[in-house]
Every structure is written in C-alpha cells, then in structure tokens.
Amino acid sequence: MKLLIVGGYGTFGGRIVQLLENEARLELIIAGRSLAKAEACCKERGTTKARLMPATFDRDGELGAQLAALLPDIVVDASGPFQAYGEGRYRLIEACIDARIHYLDLADGSDFVAGVSAFDAAAKAAGVTALSGVSSFPVLTAAVVRRLSAGMARVGTIRGGIAPSPFAGVGENVIRAIASYAGRPVRLMRGGRPAKGYPLTEQMRYTIAPPGRVPVRNTLFSLVDVPDLRALQALWPEASTTWMGAGPVPEVLHRALIGLAWLARTGLIRSLSPLAPLMHWATNRLSWGEHRGGMFVAVEGADAQGSPIKRSWHLLAEGDDGPLIPSMAVEAIIRKALDGRMPAPGARAATRDVELEDYEALFAGKTIHTGFRDDTGERKALYPDLLGDAAKPSGRNPRHA
C-alpha cells in the first residue's frame, strides 16, 4: 500500500512516519514543497521495514497531475495550519475524490472539519473514504466519551484537555493556528444553548491522575478551537456543555499567552498571528519542568432513573511517547486498511472510525498509562480515591489500561 504524507517531514507528518516505518507492507511517500527536506527526513530514519520515498508536493499546485504522478492509495494531509487554508481549502479533498484516492487529515480547526461533510455524497459515489480531524481532538475524545457514557441515558456535559510535556516540541503550524484564533469567537454549546467562546481567555484547572500513577501537576487549561466543540455535539446533541482545553507549561508562558489573547478579544490588536514566530521560539526554547504530559476527558450525565453519573478518563505519557499520540489515529486507520478494514466511504469527521480499544493496542509497549475514575457522589476515602479503578480486583477491571 502506498501512502502519501503531505507535510511528511513536519512535526506531525514525521511522527506518522515514525509510527508506520516498521510496517513492511507500506511505501511511505514523504512529501512537501522542499525535496531537500523530504530527502533529509528519509535519510534520518535510517533502515526501515517500510519503503521511504521523498517527493515534492505542493497542495497549492496542480493537484490532479501530482496525484497522477505519485499514484498513492491513501493521502494524509499533515501540513496545515488548516485555519489558514482560505479559499480552495478543500482542493486536496476534491482532487482525491476525483482520483478515487482515500484521504485523511489531521485538521484541528472546528470549521474546517465541520465543512468536510459537504463532500459526503461525492465521496460515497466515488467509493472514497475522506476523514477529517484524524487526531486526538476529536477522535480519541469521542472514543473515550463513548466508553465513559456507557449506561448513561443522557449525557449532560463533556469536558476535556491535553497537557503536553514542556519538551514535546510544538510545530510552527500549530503555533500559527493558535495565534490565528486566540481571543476570536468560536461556536460552542454552553448551558444548553449555542454560545460563543473565546479561546485562551476562558480557563479551568484540573489534575490528570490515572489510577495508581503519580498525578500530573495540577494544570491550568485554556479553551481552544478544536473540532470537538461541534463534532462531539453532533454525536451527543443532548449535551448542554462541551468544552475542550490545552494546558501548556511552563504556566508563566501560558499566562503570558492568555494576556495576549485578551488583547485580541478586546480589540486592542486584531490578531496574534504576527506574533506567531516569537510564540514558536518561546514555546520551544523556554522549557523546564517534568518531561511528562497527559490528557483527561470528563463526562457528567444521568442514568435511566435520573440519578447523576460523573466519570473521567485520565492519560499519562512519560518522556517522548506523548507527542506520538496525536498521530496515532492515522496509524490505527492505516493498520486497519492494511488488514482490509478501511472505514466506509464518505466524507466526515473521523469521530466514529477509531475506538478506544484501537488506541489501547497502540499504547501497549509505550510509557502511556490510562485509567478511569468514578467521580459520582461524595469524595471517597483517601486510598480508593487515589487508586480509582486500580483499587479494584484485576478480574473485575477489564477496562483499566
């Protein structure tokens, strides 16, 4: 199987290569505007089971001719920032459908991912699978909410957040995306009504604490514009509130970013986009603290009798394994495709195409630990509360990872 990774030598594209290079059934075309960078990436990976091939690919160029020259089975757009694609933002999706080539992207913008469904009929007619937002937000969060909401008659609130390690290494396109929407209104559900949220100016604190593990330090999370704000609402329309945040550290830099976002929100400056290069430099140079990160998803709802239920899922990633998680949804889908289980044709957000079991299989062998907590009712005694589902007998705890 031939996989074309647009932006294959970038932050997320490079991690997709790292995750799939041990698969002998794959030919990975590492592509972008710079052939020299693509060649350097292939050389840096050394000996791999997958065949690595560098190539040039310009998503603003003549896409039909470029796809015809490379003849991939699947295209993965790992470039971005998707918020900045502007007019013709879906050109690559349209070109893939026309060429009957499957398509995946790691889009992190709520508007971009929501708009992909406009191509659903065309994709189905062509027998093409076009999945958008194939990353932690919203694929992993959706998979977790499905698990957490089991047995609930109604889901009331969904909240989640990612706290990356300060040493994770943040790509320039990620910073450009954040700078473009910081302090600018985004659509979300709040208190049962459609509302506007203002990224990086709305905060909450949370402690990520997988059962039986040393918790991540209590973290300040800020609202971010991610596909979940609308994609999860489509899956659980009864949810009165959906909120997703990011908790970058060191916190002093996070608070500086919050201050800048308020300047954009109040109209004192139009956008943080001109500051993106400085933000990228600071994020990747001014790093200290523990080399560990995490993620949480918390769901509140009710059972059939109306009794409240509160559950949460916690993930802790040590060292360099955490930064791989956003690319694991792509890995899961590609490995399914290799086994003849390509997701059904159509164009949509990828929120139903990867389950938590798929992630758990990929977490195995890495320093990634997950677990569940039942937060219903009053606070439990110290040790059961600290251990969560780790306190249960192993034979009665099939969900603990």
Image (cartoon, helix red, strand yellow):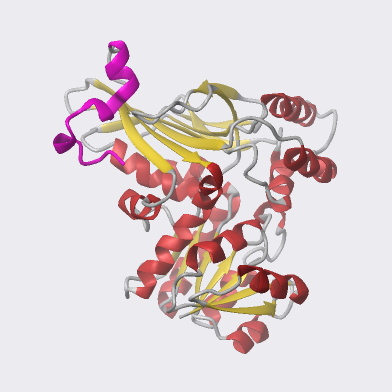
Q: Quadrant of residue 329?
A: bottom left
Judging depth in this view, the residue of 123 and 29 nearest the camera is 29
Residue at 36 percent across and 47 percent down: it is 143
Would residue 306 be found to the left or right of residue 220 on screen?
left
Residue 237 visible, this orientation = no
- Judge from the rendering whether residue 346 lies leftward or rightward of residue 324; answer left or right: left
Q: Position of residue 350 (x, y in %)?
A: 44, 57
As drawn, which residue projects farthest toward the left? 395
77 in relation to 357, above or below: below
Count of numbered labels shown in the rendering: 0
Q: Which residues are magenta?
A: 381-401
Percent x, y for residue 134?
Answer: 49, 57
The vertical placement of 103 against 381, above or below, is below
Name the quarter where the N terminus is drawn: bottom left
Instruction: Please tell me whether residue 389 belongs to the stretch shown in magenta.
Output: yes
Does the magenta-highlighted stretch encompass residue 128?
no
- Along the line of sight, which residue is nearer the eye, 367 or 316? 367
Q: Residue at x 30, y 51 (%)?
A: 357
Furthest residue in direction bottom, as rendered:
69
Image x and y of residue 44, in percent: 66, 68
Which SS type dominates the magenta stretch? Answer: helix
Is residue 111 shown to the viewer in this render? yes
Using the rendered view, name the quadrant where residue 105 is placed: bottom right
Q: At which x and y percent is residue 346?
A: 42, 68
- On the rendered image, what quadrant is the C terminus found in? top left
Q: Residue furthest front?
A: 47
Left or right relative to 65: residue 107 = left
